[in-house]
Amino acid sequence: MKLAIVGGGGFRVPLVYGALLRADFAVDEVVLHDIDEARLARISAVLDGLAAEHGDRLPFRAVTNLDDAVEGADFVFSAVRVGELQGRVVDETVPLSYGVLGQETTGPGGICFALRTIPIMVELAEVIAERAPRAWLVNFTNPAGMVTEAVQQVLGDRAVGICDSPSGLCRRVAAALGRDPAELWFDYFGLNHLGWLRGVRDSERDVLPDLLADDDALAGFEEGTLFGGDWLRTLGMVPNEYLYYFYYAADTVDAIRESPASRGAYLLEQQARFYALNGQAPGEALTAWRQTRHERERTYMAEARSASGVGGDHQESDNGGYEGEAMAVVDAIARNTRSTLICNTANRSALPFLDARAVVEVPAIVGRAGPQPVAAGPVPDHAQALVQSIKAVERATIEAALTGSPALAVKALALHPLVPSVNTARGIFEGYRERLPELQERFG
């Protein structure tokens, strides 16, 4: 099996390589691709450190030629960041100047991220279609749902989007119930970073109401403390953590404004220090990477915790993040395990109020034929309305990104529930276009 990682100089690549070292399936060749040779060299040293620690090296090579990386691949992982972290800082700060949420994947920030990312990802999909037509694209690149829907126009169902938020939520809920997640069915539905857990069923009944009624149990996991028992009981569901930005938008904006720096600015400074240490021995590189990762994970979604009054640090998990989801998809397809995984895939009829090609985030049975989404059926009215609204935003964003239409870009921003007016949308778009060369070129 050949596996290519596009964005191979990215900070999370060692997590993927570590998961590959532990995988049950055989990989013959791993190719890291990046446009930045220095970043590739830095991450390669970390991978060498991981291999030495593990005692068994999985061969890999690093290249800057995309055709070489993708040629004949069985699986392609995509983890690119167009505009790098400097772009993320712009994504976050421009909306805040208008009193609107600035966040990487939610609201205007996610739209801007997609506007510059989707054209590059469609180009990647076209290379895959030419060089590795039987390959599966496993997409980590954010905004994952939008990007997956865009590349499915080229690759069809052979493009699968993954995110660790839904599975992480399910594991945390199972732990709060004192149950093994393998024994439970999680009734989850929505879009990427816009989903709800509305039921947790064992062999006899839905046990989620037991959790919602128990404030002590709710206080034992992140979403329980973030949203609070009263709101969760009102909803009758547990939302994905990113819905905090919708339910408590003004509180989050206030918390971000009070922060000394945006999340993007923090990560930009932190990772600049890490990548500047190129030339370290493998063991030293691995130690530096782990220290940097710990600080990164500790501050994850700090603005939401601050706004909610919860405080404290994010708790790291050893259950696997994006890399665990990616390994599960590869294993399920390669070995035809027909595993149930929550992933981003074409709706077909899972959510009956969306069309068949809309990419949704729902449980799917994954085997050799790829993800087969499970029907979610009717959902609560307010969730349906929000999903439909955001899907319209996603589609306007995809069309704007592929056509270079400023009018469609403004439409996408103005349609978003977190943007209060058309004039605000116009101002945000102009702010983005002035500060981002990629948008100046595409939307000139």
Image (cartoon, rainbow, N blue to C red):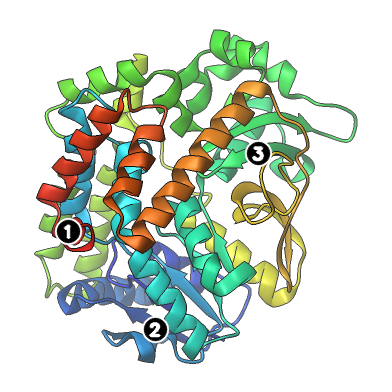
Q: Quadrant of the C terminus?
A: bottom left
Foreground disc of the pair 3, 2 = 3
Helix, strand or loop at disc 3?
strand
Q: Nearer the viewer, residue 323 or 189?
A: 189
Q: Quadrant of the N terminus?
A: bottom right
Q: Position of residue 51 (x, y in %)?
A: 38, 76
Which mark sits nearer the N-terminus, 3 or 2?
Answer: 2
> Residue type at mark 1?
Gly
Q: Residue at x 44, y 66 (%)?
A: 16
Q: Are there few (<14), some (14-19), or many (20+) residues within 10 Å of tag 1?
A: few
Q: Is residue 328 left or right of residue 56?
A: right
Q: Is residue 277 visible?
A: yes
- For marks 1 and 3, give the CA distance: 38 Å
- For marks 1 and 2, give the CA distance: 36 Å
Which residue in the structure is indicated by mark 2?
31
Which residue in the structure is indicated by mark 3?
189
